[in-house]
Image (cartoon, grey):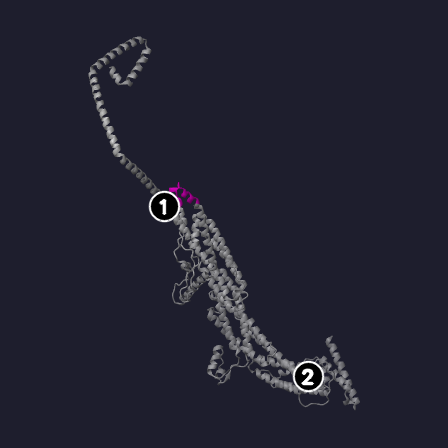
Amino acid sequence: MLSKYLLNEPMLEKCLTHLEWSVYDGEEHGRFMEKLETRIRNHDREIEKMCNFHYQGFVDSITELLKVRGEAQKLKNQVTDTNRKLQHEGKELVIAMEELKQCRLQQRNISATVDKLMLCLPVLEMYSKLRDQMKTKRHYPALKTLEHLEHTYLPQVSHYRFCKVMVDNIPKLREEIKDVSMSDLKDFLESIRKHSDKIGETAMKQAQQQRNLDNIVLQQPRIGSKRKSKKDAYTIFDTEIESTSPKSEQDSGILDVEDEEDDEEVPGAQDLVDFSPVYRCLHIYSVLGARETFENYYRKQRRKQARLVLQPPSNMHETLDGYRKYFNQIVGFFVVEDHILHTTQGLVNRAYIDELWEMALSKTIAALRTHSSYCSDPNLVLDLKNLIVLFADTLQVYGFPVNQLFDMLLEIRDQYSETLLKKWAGIFRNILDSDNYSPIPVTSEEMYKKVVGQFPFQDIELEKQPFPKKFPFSEFVPKVYNQIKEFIYACLKFSEDLHLSSTEVDDMIRKSTNLLLTRTLSNSLQNVIKRKNIGLTELVQIIINTTHLEKSCKYLEEFITNITNVLPETVHTTKLYGTTTFKDARHAAEEEIYTNLNQKIDQFLQLADYDWMTGDLGNKASDYLVDLIAFLRSTFAVFTHLPGKVAQTACMSACKHLATSLMQLLLEAEVRQLTLGALQQFNLDVRECEQFARSGPVPGFQEDTLQLAFIDLRQLLDLFIQWDWSTYLADYGQPNCKYLRVNPVTALTLLEKMKDTSRKNNMFAQFRKNERDKQKLIDTVAKQLRGLISSHHS
C-alpha cells in the first residue's frame, strides 16, 4: 500500500496533510508517531531484502562497464586519429566551404540589392520621365507623373536618402509646373488678343456664307427652310474636347493659317486656335487645388482684354476697314469666350459672359454712335449698316442678344437718310444747274420712247404730231423723277436684313421720300427760282416742269407700293407730299415771274423821259412804252404752255404794276410842275397800255377785265384833260359816279402841280384875264377838293 502511495506522491501528500490535521485535531499524536516508526522499520527491511535480491546483477553490470571503458578508450583514440586525419584531409574543404559561405552571403546580398533596386528603379524611371516631361513642356502629364511618384512609388522606398531628396523637391516641382503652365497661359492670352481680329473675321465669313446660303434656300420654292441654329454654329469648334484631359501636348496657341481664296471653304476657328494651354493650365490648377485662383486670374485678364478690344481707334470712322477690324476683334473675343464656356466646366459661366456682353454692347453702341456721326458718305453708312447686321447676326448665332444693335441701326437709319438727302441735294443742284430749261426735242420714235420710258407721260395730241416734236417739259423732269426712284431704292437697301415688317419699311421709305421732296428738292427748286440771273423763260419752264412732276406723284406712290407690297389704303400709311412740294415750287416760280415782270417793267420805266413842261401836243406813244408793250407781248406769248390762271394772273399783275408805276411816275415829288401838254403825252402812253389790254395778250379774260388795271389812270386823266370838275364834285361819293376811282388827294396833288405851271406859263401872257380866270378856277377846285378831303377824314 505504501508503494502505491509512493508511486502517487501528490495523493500521498494530500493524505498526509489530511492525516496531520486529523492527528493534531485529536489526542492520538503519540500513538501515531509509534505506528509511524514501526511502519518505517518495516519498510527499510523490505528495501534491504530487495537490494540483496538484485546485488549480483549490479556487480555484473559494473564488470561490463569496466570492459566497455577500455573499448571506449580505444574507440576514442581511433576517433581522435580519424579526426586528425579528417582535419588534415578536410582543411581544403573547409577553406572551400568558407569561400562558398562567402559566395552564398554575397549572393544573398546581391539578391537583396537587386530586390531593393527593383523597388528603386521605377522611382528613378518615373523621376527621369518627370524631368523629360518638364523639359518638353508636357506639364499636365508631368503633374500626373509627379502624383504617381509621390503616392505610389516613393512610399515603398521612403527610407532611402535620395528618396527624401525627391520628396523635398516635389513642392518645388509643383510650383515650377504651376508657374510654367501659367506662363504658357499668359502667352496664349497675349496671342489670342493679337489674333482675335483673325478669329472674328473667320466667324463673320462663316456667318456671311451661311446667310448667303439661307438667301439661296429662301429663293427656292422649298418649305421648312430654317435659319442656322446655334448647334450648327458649333461646327466652328467641331473637334472633340475632353474637359478632364489636355487637348494637345503642344502649346501652339494661335496657329498660322494662310488666307484662302473666296471660293474655297473658310477655315474654322478651331483651325486658328489651339486651346490646349487653357485646358492644361485649368487641369493643372485643379489638380493642385488652386482652380478658383486660376478662374479669377483668367476672368480678370479677359476683362482687361475686353476693355482694350472695345476701345475703338480714333480714326475708325474714316474707312470701312476701321469698323471691320473693330467688329472682328469683338467677335473674335466672344467666340473664344463662348467656346471656353462650352468646353470647360465652370472656367467661365453664363453670368460672366452676359456681364461682359452687356459691357461690350453698351461700349460698342456708344462708339458707333460717336463715329458714325462723322460719316457723310451714304455709301459708307450703308456699308457700315451691312457690317453691323453681319456683326449682329454672327453674335446672335452664338446666343448673344443683339436687339439693341438693331435699335441702334434705326438711329443710324435717320443719319443715313440725312446723308442721302445731302447727296441728293447735290444731285438735284447739278441737274437743275445743267438744265437748259427748254422743251425736250425728239426726232425719232426711239428718242420718244426713251423719254417716255424714263418718265410717265401720255399725250395723245403729242403722239399724233409728226417728228421732230417737243415734249412740254425740259430734261430735268425725267432726271429728277429717276433720281427720286433711285433715292427710294437707296432707302430700301438700308431696310434690308433689319428684320422690319413690310409696313415699317414702307413707312420708312415714305417718310424719307417726303423729306426728299419737301426739304431737299423743294430747297433746290427754290434756290433755282430765287437766282438773280433767272429769266422769265426759265421760270415758265419750271412751272411747266413742276406741273408734270406733280402729276407723276401718283406713279411714285405706285412704285413704292410695288416694292413694299403695302397698299396705300392701309391704315396709318404715310402719304407722299410731292403734290404740295411741286405746288409750292410752282407758286414760288409764279411769284418770281410776277416779280421778274415787275422788275422788267421798272427797268423800262426808268427809261421814261417826260418833258413835264412841254406845251406841244404829241401824236404817238413814248418809245420806251412801245418797247415795253412789245416786250410784254413777246413774254406772254411764251406763256402758252402755262396753266391759264398763271398766265392770266401774270398778265393782270403786270398791267396793275404798270398802272401803279405810271401813277407814281405822274405823282412823284420830283415832278413839281406839269403842263396840259405833258398830260396829253402821258394820256397817249396810257391809251397804248389800254390798247395792249384790249388786245387780249393772254386768253381767258372777260371783256374789259384787263383794262380795269388802268381804270384809275384813265378816270384821272379824263378828269384833267376834259376839265370836268363840276361833274366830279357833284357826283363824288355816289356809287355810280363817272370818276369813282379818282381820289381827291390824288386829284389835288396833280392840280397843285398844274396850278404852279399856270402861274409861270408864258403861253397866257397875252391873255391876262383868261389866265386869272383859270387860276381862280383852279383855286376854287383845289379849295373844294380840300373840303372833300377834310370831310372824308372827319
Between 732 and 143, which is closer to the camera in this rendering?
143
Q: Within 10 angstroms of label 2, few (less than 14), some, or many (20 or more) residues?
A: some
Distance from the alpha carbon under mark 2 to that under mark 1: 141 Å
The reply to whether residue 231 is in sight is no
Asked if residue 166 is among those painted magenta in the image, a careful observer would answer yes
Amino acid type, label 1? Leu
Does 14 sit left or right of 442 as displayed? left
Asked if residue 702 is among those painted magenta in the image, a careful observer would answer no
Does 393 sit left or right of 426 as displayed? left
Amino acid type, label 2? Gln
Query: Magenta-highlighted stretch: main secondary structure?
Result: helix
Between 254 and 789, which is closer to the camera in this rendering?
254
- Badge number at residue 715: 2
Between 419 and 446, which is closer to the camera in this rendering?
419
Q: What range is drawn magenta here?
A: 149-168
Q: Position of residue 725 (x, y in %)?
A: 73, 84
Does 654 sit left or right of 118 as displayed? right
Q: Determine whether the residue tagged by mark 2 lies in a helix, strand or loop.
A: helix
The residue under label 1 is: 121
> Of the residues tagged 2 and 1, which is closer to the observer?
1
